[in-house]
C-alpha cells in the first residue's frame, strides 16, 4: 500500500480550498484514464475540462478531486473546492517543496534535459529516496504536478524545466527552488519564438534565478553563449561550476572512447581523475553522464557509486532505444531499430546521426536514417535542414529517407547516392519504407514530435516482432 501523500487538511491548508469531507490521498493525477485508487484527481482545464471527468476518476477509486465547481450529481464529500484549479496545483507543489528537506536539482537545456534527469534518477536512487519528473512533465502544469507528487521524506529530487516561449523558465525555477540548477546546453531550438540563439541562452540561464540561497549553477563551458550563462550565475550569487571539454572547466571531459555498444569516459572532476563506462554509445552520452555526475557531487552524493549505477542505465522509449525487429517474421529480414523519434533539433539530430555513423551493421546491412521535420526553427529552417547534408556523420550513412516539407530541403541537398525516399508526411513514408529495408540494416528514426515520425517506428514494429535488446543510445 502506498503511503499517504496528502490529507484533506493538509491539502486545504496548502491550497486555501475547502474539503467537503476527510480523506487521504496517496498520489496526484491529472488524467482520469490513468488515475489510480487513492489518487487526488486534479480537474485541470486543457484541451478538455477536467471537471467533465471527475465522476470517472472517483468511480475508479480516486480519494478525492480538486475542483473549482461541483460537477452535477456529485457528492461534495470527496471534493476539494478551490478558486482556480491550476493555481491550487501550483500552491500544492509549493507546499510540497517547502515541507521537504530534499536536495533538489533542476534541469533545463536545449538538448539532453530528459536524459540527464533520467540519469540522475538512476544515479541517486541507490543512495537515497529519489523523486523525479515522469515523462517530460516540464511545463506550467508539469512542474507543479511533479512537486505535488513529492513525498515529504524525499532525499533527492530532480525537476525538469522546459520552455517554448520567453519568460517561462524563471517562474518554474522559483517554484522548484533548486539547490542545484543545470543548463545542459544551448542550441538552436524554438528559434521561432526567440529569433536568435542569445535569446535562448538568456531564457535557459534564467533557471538560476530560482536557486535557493547558497545554490550551485552548473553551466556548459563549450557553447558560444557560455558567457551569458556564467554572467547570470554570478549575478544571482550562485556558486558556478563549469562542465565540458574546455580548458578551465571544473568538470572536464578529457577522453571519450566509443564502440557500437558502449562509451568509456575519462574525466577530471573537481581535481580528481574519474574513469567510467556507459552501456550506451555516443559522445553526447558521455557529456550527459558528466553533467549528471557533476550534479551528484554538488548535492553531496557518492560519485563513484553514482557512476556504477550509470553503468547499467538505459534510455527511455523514443530517445535512442535500440531493438531488433524481424520484418519477415521468419528471420529473413532482421533490422536494428534506433528509436529516437521523441523529438529533434539540430544539435540532437547531429548527435543521433553520430550514433548511427558509429553503428556496425551485420551481414552487409546499411546505416539508414529516417528523418522528419525539425519544427520551431523560424525563417532559417529550410537552410538548417539542407545543412544537415554537410554534417561529418553523413559520410558514413548509406541512405537517408525524409518526410515533411522542411526535410525536403535535405532530400534535395543530398547526393544521389545517399538520397532515399521522400514522403509528404511521416505516414506516407511509413507505408513505403519497409519494402526498401534489407537484412542487417541499422535504422535511425528521428524528428520533432509534431512531425509524427514516430509513426514510422510504430509501422516497423507492427510489421515485425520486436525483440528488446540493449538500449544503446539516447538524447
Image (cartoon, helix red, strand yellow):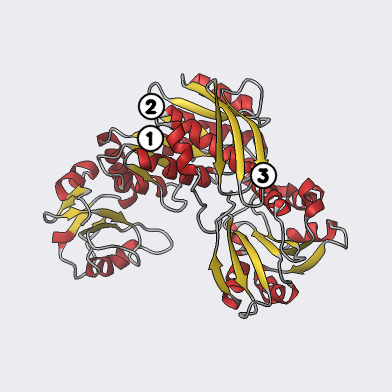
From the viewer's perspective, is the residue at label 1 or at label 3 nearer? Answer: 3
Residue in view at x 14 percent, y 55 percent: 23
Residue at image position (41%, 40%) is: 158
Name the residue that disc number 1 marks. 104
Q: Are marks 3 and 2 in contact (CB under 8 Å)?
A: no
Quadrant in the rendering for residue 45: bottom left
In the image, is residue 29 above or below residue 232?
A: below
Quadrant for residue 309, please give it: top left
* Cβ–Cβ under 8 Å for marks 2 and 1: yes
Residue 473 located left or right of residue 80: right
Residue at (55, 68) in percent of width and height: 467
Quick one: label 2, few (<14), some, or many (20+) residues within 10 Å? some
Q: Position of residue 31 (x, y in %)?
A: 35, 62
Tag 3: Cα neighbours inside 10 Å, few (<14), some, or many (≥20)? some
The numbered disc on residue 258 is 3
- Residue projecting furthest to the right: 416
| Residue 212 numbered mark, or none | 2
Mark 3 to mark 2 CA distance (whole Å): 38 Å
For marks 3 and 2, the one nearer the N-term is: 2
Counting from the top left corner in percent of width and height, residue 209 is at 46, 28
Q: Identify the secondary structure beneath mark 2.
A: loop
Amino acid at each position: 500500500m502506498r503511503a499517504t501523500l496528502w490529507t484533506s487538511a493538509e491539502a486545504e491548508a496548502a491550497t486555501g480550498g475547502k474539503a467537503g469531507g476527510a480523506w487521504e490521498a496517496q498520489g496526484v493525477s491529472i488524467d482520469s484514464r490513468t488515475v489510480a485508487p487513492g489518487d487526488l484527481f486534479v480537474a485541470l482545464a486543457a484541451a478538455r475540462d477536467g471537471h467533465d471527468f471527475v465522476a470517472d476518476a472517483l468511480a475508479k477509486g480516486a480519494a478525492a478531486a480538486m475542483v473549482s465547481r461541483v460537477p452535477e450529481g456529485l457528492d461534495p464529500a470527496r471534493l476539494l473546492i478551490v478558486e482556480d484549479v491550476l493555481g491550487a496545483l501550483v500552491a500544492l507543489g509549493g507546499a510540497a517543496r517547502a515541507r521537504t528537506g530534499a536536495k533538489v536539482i533542476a534541469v533545463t537545456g536545449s538538448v539532453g534535459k530528459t536524459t540527464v534527469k533520467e540519469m540522475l534518477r538512476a544515479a541517486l536512487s541507490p543512495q537515497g529516496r529519489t523523486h523525479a519528473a515522469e515523462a517530460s512533465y516540464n511545463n506550467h502544469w508539469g512542474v507543479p504536478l511533479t512537486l505535488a507528487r513529492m513525498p515529504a521524506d524525499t532525499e533527492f529530487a530532480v525537476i525538469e524545466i522546459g520552455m517554448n516561449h520567453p519568460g517561462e523558465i524563471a517562474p518554474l525555477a522559483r517554484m522548484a527552488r533548486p539547490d542545484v540548477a543545470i543548463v545542459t546546453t544551448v542550441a538552436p531550438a524554438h528559434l521561432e519564438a526567440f529569433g536568435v540563439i542569445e535569446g535562448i541562452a538568456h531564457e535557459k540561464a534564467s533557471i538560476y534565478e530560482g536557486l535557493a540561497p547558497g545554490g550551485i549553477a552548473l553551466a556548459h563551458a563549450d557553447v558560444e553563449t557560455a558567457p551569458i550563462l556564467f554572467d547570470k550565475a554570478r549575478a544571482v550569487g550562485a556558486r558556478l561550476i563549469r562542465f565540458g571539454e574546455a580548458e578551465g572547466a571544473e568538470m572536464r571531459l578529457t577522453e571519450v572512447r566509443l564502440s557500437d555498444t558502449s562509451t568509456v569516459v575519462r574525466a577530471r572532476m573537481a581535481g580528481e581523475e574519474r574513469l567510467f563506462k556507459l552501456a550506451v554509445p555516443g559522445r553526447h552520452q558521455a557529456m550527459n553522464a558528466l553533467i549528471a555526475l557533476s550534479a551528484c557531487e554538488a548535492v553531496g552524493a557518492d560519485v563513484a557509486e553514482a557512476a556504477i549505477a550509470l553503468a547499467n542505465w538505459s534510455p527511455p522509449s523514443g530517445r535512442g532505444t535500440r531493438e531488433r525487429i524481424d520484418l519477415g517474421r521468419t528471420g529473413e529480414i532482421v533490422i536494428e531499430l534506433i528509436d529516437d523519434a521523441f523529438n529533434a533539433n539540430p544539435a540532437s539530430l547531429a548527435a543521433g546521426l553520430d550514433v548511427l555513423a558509429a553503428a556496425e551493421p551485420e551481414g552487409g546491412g546499411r546505416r539508414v536514417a529516417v528523418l522528419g521535420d525539425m519544427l520551431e526553427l523560424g525563417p532559417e529552417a529550410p537552410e538548417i535542414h539542407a545543412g544537415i547534408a554537410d554534417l561529418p556523420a553523413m559520410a558514413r550513412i548509406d541512405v537517408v529517407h525524409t518526410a515533411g516539407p522542411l526535410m525536403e530541403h535535405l532530400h534535395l541537398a543530398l547526393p544521389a547516392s545517399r538520397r532515399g525516399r521522400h514522403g509528404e508526411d511521416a505516414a506516407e513514408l511509413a507505408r513505403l519504407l519497409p519494402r526498401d529495408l534489407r537484412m542487417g540494416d541499422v535504422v535511425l528514426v528521428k524528428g520533432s514530435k509534431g512531425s509524427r515520425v514516430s509513426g514510422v517506428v510504430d509501422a516497423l514494429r507492427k510489421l515485425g516482432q520486436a525483440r528488446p535488446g540493449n538500449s544503446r543510445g539516447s538524447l
